[in-house]
Image (cartoon, helix red, strand yellow):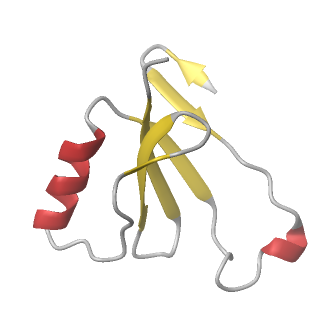
Amino acid sequence: MCRENVEIHFQWHDAQEWAYPNDRPSYRFVVQDVEELQREFSESGVSDMTPVSKTPWGTLEFHVRDYDGNLLQFYRWLEP
């Protein structure tokens, strides 16, 4: 879903997948500076977070689990 400068990606999961530890939704956010945002989160004490990494599908991203257990994914597309 996209509107003006905001883009939200929704993912469907089968009901059988909604058991611990995958019992929460996942949200993806496009950001300009993935490394800086990860550094900011790290410096503020966020601990349930992956390192920034390149993916096989062409993004640079990291993931954070919020206090409710939802997965937040922050990424940017890599240059072709």
User: In the shown orientation, is residue 17 left or right of residue 79?
Assistant: right
Question: Residue 10: where, in percent of width, then height?
Answer: 68, 43
Question: Residue 45: where, in percent of width, then height?
Answer: 16, 73
Whether residue 9 is situated above or below residue 6 in the rendered picture: below
Q: How many marks?
A: 0
User: In the shown orientation, is residue 6 left or right of residue 46?
Assistant: right
Q: Residue at x 10, y 65 (%)?
A: 43
Q: Residue at x 18, y 44 (%)?
A: 36
In the picture, residue 40 is in which quadrant?
bottom left
Whether residue 21 is situated above or below residue 65 in the rendered picture: below
User: In the shown orientation, is residue 69 left or right of residue 42?
Assistant: right
Q: Residue at x 42, y 18 (%)?
A: 5
User: In the shown orientation, is residue 27 left or right of residue 76?
Assistant: right
Furthest-top residue in this view: 4
Whether residue 5 is situated above or below residue 14 in the rendered picture: above
Question: Residue 18: where, in percent of width, then height?
Answer: 77, 75
Furthest-left residue in this view: 43
Quadrant holding the N terminus = top right
Question: Residue 46: where, in percent of width, then height?
Answer: 24, 71
Q: Residue at x 64, y 83 (%)?
A: 21
